[in-house]
Image: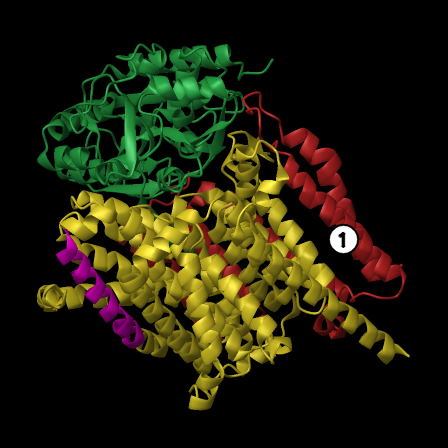
Chain colours: A red, B green, C yellow
Amino acid sequence: MTSTTLRGLGIALFFGIVIWVLIPGYVPKPAFLPGFALPPDFWPRVISIAGLVFGLIAAGLGLAGQGTPALPAEVAEDDTPMGTLLARLGLLVAAFVAFVLLVDVIGFLAAAILLTGAGILLTGERRLLAWGAGLALILPVCLYLFFTEALGTQFPPGLLFN
Amino acid sequence: MKKILASVATTAVLAAGSVSAQDYPSEAITLVIPYGPGGASDLAGRALAESAGKFLDEPITVVNKPGAGGMNGARSVSQADPDGYTLLLARVGMALAPAVNPQVQTGWDDYSFVGSLEATPMILAVREGSEYGSVEELMAAVKENPGAMTYAASGPTAIDGFTVQALLSDAGLDPLADATIVPYKGGGALATALLGGHVDFLAIAAGSLMPHINSGDMKPLAVFSPERMDDLPDVPTVAELGYETAGQITGWSALYGPEGLPEEVQAKWDEVLGQVAEDETWLTLAERRGSISTVGEKDMPAYAESQYELFRGLAEEFGYLGN
Amino acid sequence: MLNELMTALQAVATLQNFLIMAAGIWGGVIIGAIPGMTGTMAVTLALPFTFYMDPVPSILLLVALYKGSTYGGSVSAILIRTPGTASAACTALDGYPLAQQGKAGKALNMALYSSVVGDFFSNISLIFLAAPLAILALKVGPPEYFMLMVFALTTVAGVSGNSLLMGLLSACFGLLLATAGEDMYGSFRFAFTGDMQAGLSVAPVLIGLFALPELIKLIVFRNPPKARAMALGDDRVSGKEFRGVAKTLFRGSFIGVILGAIPGIGPSAAAFFSYGSAQRSSPRGQNFGKGEIEGVAASESANNGACGATMIPLLALGVPGDVITGVMLGAFMIQGLTPGPLLFETNIHEVYMLFIGMLLSSVLLLFAGKFTMRIFTTIAKIPPTLLSPVVLLLCLFGIYAIGNSMFDVVVLLALGLVGFGMYLLDIPTAPFLIAFILGPMIEENLRRALATSRGDPMVLLSSPITWIFAALILFVVALTARREIGKANQRKAEAQ
């Protein structure tokens, strides 16, 4: 099976789950729906059925050897080993998750500093590290002061400093 | 690395400041408006921020958190730290939504009731040139052709939907089926729907309708308010017309906080609200947006409970709660 | 009238007013250009200041902020593929590729000229055509609305890149995501958590989908070669180029004015609409999305054209068409002025002052834009390895500050990953966003129309406006189908 077919099937599967699992489970029909009204599940159902059909067509085109490839050309040409690519993506996702979790512990500002620093390191920047460290430290503090002072925004302070 | 962490920690500590109830308020207070900018509740919140900010010596930052019929912002405040730095501009929706929608998780009493702010009358109106000159004629037309008449509202479980439904119910009609609700978002869109003739009538907040009534594009039939409005002395209240349940429905705003506010905070606000009640800015702004200041006049917990009970009763009667 | 105009001119032409407007425009451009900060934010922040100002300057300040931020959104859209406002999303489609080709300055200039032209047209329409346009706008009921928005959605076909099917699928994802949250009748859909009851806001979805995938690509593939070419280089718009897009500019401004005048549509839908029609009628239509200057002109003339026109229903009828004019209505009321037909009788002096001020703001926009462009283009010199994480940082702060909401930040990061996944699967993201913004308008108006007709679908074809748009939709669908069949045949011929 080609990647094109798999992509089509994957999409069809997603919309199938929406139609048969998510809509029955999470789109209730309230008792206060008036006499002449399309129910809340009408529109999501129409869209999902369209998506399911398009997904199956995409898979069919893949089987027939037609349709666009499921990977952009510049990615297909990239010769970095798959493991490295996955590791980089994994690290970034971990940084995102860590940020969201850390906000409650060390506060928005400190977590933002860490995420920016991690972001700069992950881009592979090694020559301008001093600049990077400076940016990652000073810019968040400036932004923090701007938003709290000028706009009165209150950021989560975190448990540690509360 | 240690150095960096230490400096980060210091800035964070400096920025967070020390919070204690004794010197409340020692930093800016966030007032959450559970609806979008520009509407009646937004204007009320911003007016309160202006007026109360003067007496608090600390600014009040207004944040709009719309969504879920106002319950998104309300929920976020009810779950916030009860330190007095996050407050809610509560509306009638905070008592209405938990009473009528089983999906709403935040109860009517999951807050501290800091004080009442204002009453916002609602007006039942039709387009100028409409053949209906009174509530009675309108109800008769609804009765004659069930389902054919349409009205605009924010939704069947919103306050401006309940105004019409209570009226229908009082007139002995089916609140859901006899007149067809057409939901719109926001006072501007609701008023446009009536102006454009896309619906037959509506009963929404006075602030959104007064301009069109003054310009002669809309005809007021009745007001939902305990008393007649100063600007519309000839328009009867629905209670006067004998619609009993509908007569108890009106709009209001109040100041809420998360449950368990410290006494010092409540005391400070009692003092501040006392000053706001007589503040020129607050009173002028209230008059201009068509509402009546009731700062500190109502026993808020009791009033909120009575409102909740009223809507709960209606929801049960109308069969909104399902099984 | 001339006499009244002269006295109004004298009253409005003070140094103070001039400074207020210059500050508003420039502040708006900057706020709009910062990723994660929106025009709505700018206008709501300025609202308390207007409590203490005279009526006319306070409205002018808000208008200036609105216009400035609508243009400003295009600056970051072009330079870092981060539309500052949703209405600049189509600007990013062509502006960013242009910047990568080393033509950032050209794209920025074109965006500015188009914005000023659109703005000028909308001011003129506001002054001379407010009453007829407002009456037309009131005629637009749910069925007309529905048809109009479905037609705007056909733009999806034009932004689908090399596969229409993937574009349609992307649009389905966007439409589906937009249904999460509060249903128009008051129940909740796909409310997996309490936060989901409010649904997803446009800003985090927009920025997550457009800006973040650039950072993730940079981190995962580590080859930012194109970005290095982002020197300013070719930065002037030649007279020939300007004449070449003149038709598009007029059409964009016209679309902007008409759609802006209809309450509830706003600049984003106008920009999508204009981009779609420009792409269909342009001889260089195939080049749209790959760095076509005409695409920038189409999008920017329409969104600024809509900007001034949203004032038409506000002033002539007293009904706000979107959130920003809603805030302005609040400002009017606080000042004791009531917009609507009466305003033209009781406060004609103030109305004229407002008109003159708005005309002046078009000129100010040109200067403020030129000036800001210089500052922002220096960011092209920052290496992408530092710039991308900084953009992420700006987005985090901006998105959090819109609603003090960590949920919005989570949505931002999650949509960034979704956008990257879509890139890997070669599914275009622009249809997703367009569908996400238009989806609720389509669904709600369909359900409104069917509620008033008590379930009779013929209501959707009940007026001349709906017939026209139904015909246009059929035409575009047929055109697209023909083009697709042509493409398929071509591929077959190549394969043999």
Q: Which amino acid does label 1 sit on?
A: Phe
Identify the image quadrant of residue C94.
bottom right
Residue C352 colored in magenta in the image: yes
- Which x, y percent locates residue B88? 32, 31
Q: In this view, does A13 lie to the left or right of C15?
A: right
Residue at (43, 52) in percent of width and height:
C399
Residue B244 position by quadrant: top left
Question: Please, what is the dominant secondary structure of the magenta stretch?
Answer: helix
Query: Does residue B311 appear to the left or right of A21 in the view shown?
Result: left
Asked which secondary structure carries label 1, the reply is: helix
Q: Which of C31 and A156 is in front in this view?
A: C31
Q: Give the range drawn in magenta.
A: C347-368
Q: Mark 1 points at which residue?
A: A54
x and y percentages locating residue C333 in the rendered image = 21, 43
Residue A53 sits above or below residue C304 on the image: above
Is residue C124 visible in the rendered image? The answer is: yes
Task: In the rendered view, tell whether residue B92 sits above or below residue C115.
Answer: above
